[in-house]
Image (tube, helix red, strand yellow):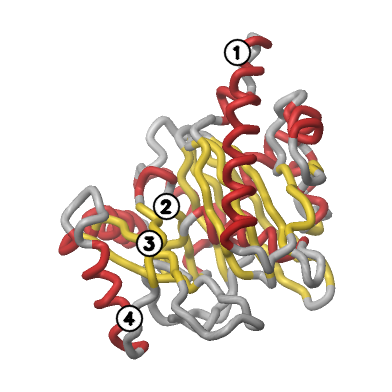
Amino acid sequence: MGLFKRAKKTDGWLTVTFLRDGVCAGRVQRRRDAKAIVELSAFYPADTSFSPDVLDKLNKDLKAGAYNCGTMLSGGEYQMLTVDAPNVPQDELKTAVRWRLKDMLDFHVDDATIDVLDIPVDSNAPSRGHSMFAIAARNALIQSRQTLFSEAKLDLTVIDIPEMAQRNISAQLETDGRGLAMLSFDEDGGLLTITYKAELYLSRRIDVTLEQLLERDSDRQQLHFDKITLELQRSLDHFDRQFHYVNVLKLLLAPTGAQGLHEHLASNLYMPVEAMTLDDVFDLSKAPELQDIAQQQRFFLTLGAALRHEEVRL
């Protein structure tokens, strides 16, 4: 799933993401019945991460022009909304969703690039209406990202979102027949997802940033931990009511470097909480720098996006 895409190359994916302190580039090699190999993880520090100069250097260093390039929007650059799925033919779906979004966006719907993602229904329940995710970003933002890559002579093939990058990682760690909750943090805040059979069922943003998690004042850090716990309890309870047929096995906590968060969540949530590392998903033998927890946090969503593969589009 991506907001747009063009013709594919054959040399694989290179994912380029923009952080506030620089640019991440990641590439993985997927393998059947084995962990994907991280073939590249590179970080380019920059005061302005959207600088064409940074992409030019990345292109020269990594020979990025040989690959399909993907990128990812940050948390504040799009809106992700849940809507009732319109009862229309497939070729009319996005038009119908656009109409439903016209009073839900914080900008005019005519200025939006829109994509949709289905939320599967209970296969054992009577046929009835269901919901889907609608993702909307401003046309001007999408155009500016295309222009940035074009000026660096990079073939930008797809623009993704963090929810789908995290879904890609979660899908690798699911237990057959059980749902999986996953929680990560970055400079935009917390991201909770729940997947089942490799499909995204729930996404929630938590208004606590990585910087706040790493707060040195223990009292203030405890307040952030309590806020996260409350948001998780509410979201998990809501999910249990809405998707009672999905049995969520556990919550996986992505690398953060925050001391005490895992223990706090484990002692305050009703479901098991486990801390994960990138080693659980990827073969890091070619990327030993990713053994560092801070680097695992930095590259978590970039490598998740790099796991993407072409799917049947709605």
Q: Is residue 12 above or below residue 139?
A: below
Quadrant in the picture for the C terminus: bottom left
Give how far across and how far down residue 58 sits, in percent.
49, 51
- Between 55 and 264, the one lying in front of the other is 264
Tags 2 and 1 touching, CB below 8 Å: no
Give how far across and how far down residue 12 sits, in percent.
59, 73
Amino acid type shown at disc 4: Leu
Q: In whole angstroms, how far apart are the C-alphas of marks 2 and 3?
A: 11 Å
Q: Under tag 3, what secondary structure?
A: strand
Mark 1: few/some/many CA within 10 Å (<14, 14-19, 20+): few
Amino acid type shown at disc 1: Arg
Q: Which residue is mark 1?
A: 220
- Between 180 and 40, the one lying in front of the other is 180
Mark 2: few/some/many CA within 10 Å (<14, 14-19, 20+): some
Amino acid type shown at disc 3: Ile
Mark 3 or mark 1, which has the lower sequence index?
A: 3
The residue located at (48%, 65%) in the rendering is 69
Q: Which residue is mark 4?
A: 93
The residue located at (44%, 78%) in the rendering is 129
Mark 2 or mark 3, which has the lower sequence index?
A: 2
Mark 2 or mark 1, which has the lower sequence index?
A: 2
